Image: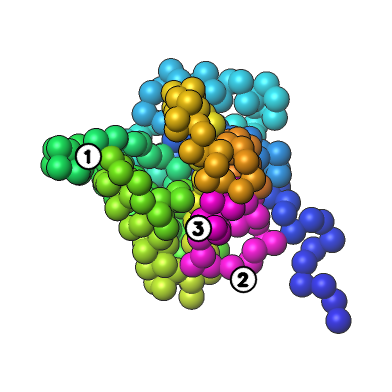
Amino acid sequence: MSSPFEPTSPFDLTGRRALVTGSSRGIGLAIARSLLGAGAQVVIHGRSAETVQATAVALASQFGADAVSTVVFDVTDEQSVVEGVAELEASGPIDILVNNAGLQHREPMLQVSVEDWERVIRTDLTSAFLVGRTVARGMIGRGTGAIVNICSVQTDLARPTIGAYTAAKHGLRGLTRAMTAEWAGSGVRVNGVAPGYIRTELTQPLVDDPVFNAWVLGRTPAGRWGEPEDIGGAVVWLASDASRFVTGQVVFVDGGMTAVV
């Protein structure tokens, strides 16, 4: 019986184009690097043209100018999303979408304003719906595509003062399943990756907080913070043919945090 895969590695993404939202820094940037390393062409995205361009230039110096392009649009605004995706698709299809853009707001729910609540929900959940369905239209037309939604350990857990973020990330798992229910039959796979506590410039204040740092290290069986690069491998797997029968799943990359009491 012949192998269902080509002789090349099933993880090889050569010839595929990926859009990673929120990829000018942090986890998004690390995901972009991993996809580039697997052979994909990657579109760097953000809302600041200057920051996006600087990131693209740095990546192009390592992976080649032809491998990196840029786009700037607001993931929370439908018209901006539609125009941004149309701009990209004018030069070729989007084969892989990573919904990574997001933000955090720390405040007890008894004090958090409706405006801040809705800002988090719109950025962390609604954006994945807006960008996801806009890109999926092209994928469905071609009969193939992979979407990876970046979730969180808060997809399963909860902590005080981050109620809106927790609600959004729980919702993102539901959205991943809903997308699967509607699009899997059209050849579009949708999965999630749920990072644990990852050391980035945004979380550095938490790393530097002795009490919080001790809690993370004690709560994580692996005994360390994750690094942004730890997320990239899971995304490459879910974007590639190596996971061609995997859809509707959320893979936790958390050093074991959600596996123990």
Q: Residue at x 15, y 42 (%)?
A: 110
Relative to residue 4, is residue 111 drawn left or right? left
Depth check: 61 or 164 in front?
164
Residue drawn 70% across the image and 43% down it: 39
Amino acid at circle 2? Phe
Q: Residue at x 36, y 57 (%)?
A: 170
Q: Which residue is mark 1?
A: 108
Task: Classify residue 113 by image quadrant.
Answer: top left
The residue at 42%/67% (across/down) is: 177
Report the residue marked by disc 2.
245
Residue 74 x/y as whole percent: 32, 36
Residue stretch in magenta: 234-261
Q: Amino acid at mark 3?
A: Val
Which of label 3 and label 1 is nearer to you?
A: 3
| Pointer 3 residue | 261
**Viewer-nearest residue: 52 or 85:** 52
Q: Position of residue 207 (x, y in %)?
A: 50, 27
- Distance from the alpha carbon under mark 2 to that under mark 3: 31 Å
Which quadrant of the figure has residue 22? top left
Which amino acid does the dot numbered 1 rest on?
Pro
Is residue 249 within the magenta segment?
yes
